Image (spheres, coloured by chain):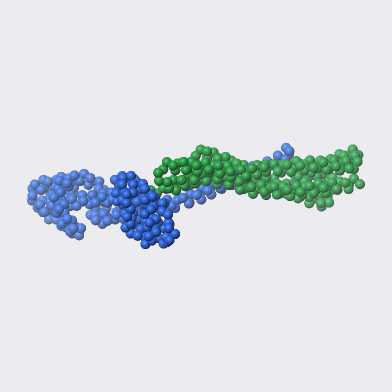
């Protein structure tokens, strides 16, 4: 027996090495194999969410051609002037008049500075670069160049409006995103509850108006646009009622008593 | 709303509950041991078969029995089971013949000695095959136990959520199923190897037995 055991010693270490090799190969296969499967769906989800944020973003950029190099730094300085434009709410009514031409007659402010240096070279250039409303009141008191003043004010107001617009758009985009997520949550829950009728086929779309009370209690469900298949419409309606209580939004401010929801029950 | 679960194998194992982890660790150890024995048995059975074939060839090529016995007893570390059976039988035969025992006793004694060696050899070849058999039959159940436990936990966690979706249970079930996967990974090769080795050992032992019969006939003839 001793002889037999001695005889097998080399095979013993080879076996340990081979067994290790097999397990390492399996571990590597599992590690990489399973990883590949899990990543693609994650990437798809990210792109879906980012889409609504991108579409509203482009409009502000063409609207503000002047600060082309720095669209981002603008909002920051604007935070301070914001209270200042408020004392001059009178311009806003005028502003529409100016605003409309301002988009095209951009050169307008530029020709003016040229005549400027002639009458008053010293004081004017300073407020110009800063464009702060603070120095403007004294200017107005002087009341020498009221038209230029108005223009300056209008420009300030315009810029403040643009900044506010930018912020609003950003807020709106964020709200849209949470709103979309909220709706997706409801749609997901309803979809899980839909019992598809046998007649269902294709990828029809139905729009429902859902009235809910606080806490997501479904009060009323009204068909706005039918799928064309009454059985399917009924199935969706039942599913909505069965989904009571509806999921709540992440941001409670988004809660809305009346929701317009679109359903594509057959969408894979 | 998108639930981006990282389903890589590492996170699946890391997030499993303690008992499931223990089951997985046990199965990993068992799988390693079964693979170790698979390779060792593979080498030792293959070696035994090769040596036996080589000895059989040289035996039937009509060599001198004394010469064969010399080489077999000289190089004991490097012999196959058939050679060892021959050696023990021939040793007993020469001893009994020196004592002038009658023919029946001599052949029977040599045969008994060969049978004893044969049984030892077969026992050694079959050693640890039972381990492979139990791994093959038990480890799927152990893995299943881990899975059932993991799924129980997954569903218990589901009871705390008001709106139950598949996304809440799926990761837990995926974690739990890893245990079954490991159990099957340990079991399948063990079963295949067990069947293969059992078959190989059967064939080899039949070959050894027929050699014993033939060799005792030769010894019987030598006495005349």
Count the numbered circles shown.
0
Place of residue A118 in the rendered image (x, y in percent of width and height, measured from the top left): 10, 54
User: Measured along the vertical axis of the image, is residue A201 above or below residue B80?
Assistant: below
Q: Is residue A27 left or right of residue A128?
A: right
Residue B58 in the image, given as x and y percentages of width and height = 79, 50
Give the chain coloured green. Answer: B
In the displayed structure, does residue B34 sit left or right of residue A93?
right
Q: Position of residue A201 (x, y in %)?
A: 42, 61
Viewer-closest of B219 and A256 = A256
Judging from the image, what is the letter of the chain drawn in blue?
Answer: A
Q: Quadrant of residue B77?
A: top right
The image shows residue A223 at horizontal and vertical percentages of: 33, 57
Residue at point 20% right, 49% down?
A160
Does residue A157 appear in this view? yes
From the viewer's side, name the closer residue of B109 and B135. Answer: B135
At x 41%, y 53%, the residue is A194
- Residue B28, quarter of picture: top right
Q: Which sits in the foreground, A122 or A124?
A: A124
| Left or right position of B195 against A140 | right
* B77 horizontally vs B34: left or right: right
Residue at point 62%, 48% (across, down): B189
Name the residue rendered at 62%, 45% in the picture: B136
Residue A16 visible in the current orientation: no
């Amino acid at each position: 027996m001793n002889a037999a055991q001695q005889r097998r010693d080399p095979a013993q270490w080879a076996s340990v090495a081979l067994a290790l090799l097999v397990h390492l190969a399996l571990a590597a296969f599992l590690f990489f194999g399973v990883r590949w499967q899990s990543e693609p769906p994650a990437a798809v989800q990210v792109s879906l969410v980012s889409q609504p944020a991108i579409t509203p973003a482009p409009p502000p950029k063409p609207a503000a051609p002047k600060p082309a190099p720095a669209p981002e730094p603008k909002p920051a300085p604007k935070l301070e002037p914001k209270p200042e434009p408020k004392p001059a709410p009178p311009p806003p009514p005028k502003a529409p008049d100016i605003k409309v031409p301002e988009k095209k007659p951009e050169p307008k402010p530029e020709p003016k500075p040229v005549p400027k240096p002639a009458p008053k070279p010293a004081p004017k250039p300073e407020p110009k670069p800063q464009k702060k409303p603070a120095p403007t009141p004294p200017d107005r008191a002087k009341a020498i160049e009221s038209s230029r003043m108005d223009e300056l004010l209008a420009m300030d107001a315009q810029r403040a409006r643009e900044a506010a617009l930018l912020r609003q758009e950003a807020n709106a985009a964020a709200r849209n995103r949470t709103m979309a997520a909220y709706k997706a949550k409801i749609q997901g829950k309803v979809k899980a509850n839909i019992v598809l009728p046998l007649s269902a086929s294709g990828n029809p779309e139905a729009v429902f108006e859902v009235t809910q009370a606080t806490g997501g209690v479904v009060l009323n469900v009204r068909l706005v646009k039918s799928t064309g298949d009454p059985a399917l419409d009924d199935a969706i309606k039942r599913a909505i009622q069965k989904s009571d209580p509806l999921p709540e939004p992440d941001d409670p401010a988004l809660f809305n008593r009346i929701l317009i929801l679109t359903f594509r029950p057959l969408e894979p | 709303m998108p639930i981006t679960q990282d389903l890589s194998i590492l996170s699946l194992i890391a997030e499993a509950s303690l008992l499931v982890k223990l089951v997985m660790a046990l199965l990993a150890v068992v799988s390693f041991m079964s693979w170790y024995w698979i390779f060792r048995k593979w080498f030792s059975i293959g070696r035994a078969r090769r040596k036996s074939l080589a000895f059989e060839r040289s035996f039937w090529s009509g060599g001198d029995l004394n010469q064969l016995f010399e080489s077999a007893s000289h190089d004991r570390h490097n012999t196959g089971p058939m050679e060892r059976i021959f050696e023990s039988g021939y040793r007993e035969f020469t001893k009994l013949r020196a004592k002038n025992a009658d023919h029946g006793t001599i052949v029977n004694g040599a045969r008994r000695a060969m049978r004893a060696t044969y049984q030892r050899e077969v026992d050694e070849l079959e050693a640890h095959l039972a381990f492979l058999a139990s791994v093959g039959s038990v480890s799927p159940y152990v893995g299943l136990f881990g899975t059932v436990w993991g799924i129980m936990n997954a569903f218990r966690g589901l009871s705390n959520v008001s709106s139950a979706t598949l996304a809440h249970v799926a990761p837990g079930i995926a974690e739990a199923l890893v245990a079954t996967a490991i159990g099957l990974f340990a079991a399948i090769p063990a079963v295949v190897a067990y069947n293969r080795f059992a078959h190989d050992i059967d064939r080899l032992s039949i070959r050894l037995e027929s050699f014993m019969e033939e060799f005792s006939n030769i010894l019987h003839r030598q006495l005349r």
